[in-house]
Amino acid sequence: MSETFSFFERITRTAKNIGEPVVSEGESIHPFDERNIHSDIAGVSIKLFDDGHYAQATFEAFKYIDNQVKAISGIEDTGFSLMMNAFNETGPKIKLTDLKTMSDKDEQKGFRYVFAGTMSGIRNPRGHDNRIDPIDMCLDHLSVASVLFRALEARKAP
């Protein structure tokens, strides 16, 4: 890429995100590292994020979680209903806890609603509408996605 074009591209990207926090080229820490974004979530969203496509980066992260839950649970559904069925505390396809104590059951139930809620409240609007998210909102969403993915990784069964 020519130096002039590269300079123009930096100016254009900066102008697009006026008023947003900027990661300078000299910094060695990526915002994903600062937020401890899970490597699998980063794998599907970092290029979009780095290119300034924050809403799409968020959408891809939650689509990835949806697909992982579908693959692990064996349920042929998607979104809210997939999460409600997969994490059902009375007969879950995916057990996040041992489900022996009331606390275990409450945690399973809570995560069930968090997984389902993020599909309706975060993923779906970005899949159905043209959204322009600010950088901080995207990083917050990717942090939530990372928490959910880590809970999925730490599951008790299957």
Image (cartoon, rainbow, N blue to C red):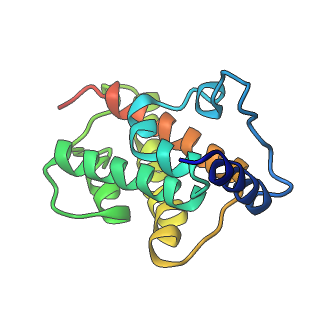
Side of 73 where 97 appears, left or right: right
Residue 157 % position (x, y): 21, 29
Residue 71 % position (x, y): 18, 47
Residue nearest the viewer, comparing 32 with 124: 32
Location of residue 33 by image quarter: top right
x 44%, y 60%: residue: 119
x 24%, y 44%: residue: 92
Side of 109 where 18 appears, left or right: right
Residue 35 % position (x, y): 63, 30
Q: Residue at the right extreme? A: 19
In the displayed structure, 49 sits above or below 104; it is: below
x 50%, y 53%: residue: 57
x 13%, y 50%: residue: 74
Q: Could you tell me how many numbered marks the image carries?
A: 0
Side of 121 where 76 appears, left or right: left
Side of 41 where 4 appears, left or right: right
- Position of the C terminus, as image quadrant, is top left
Residue 155 % position (x, y): 30, 28
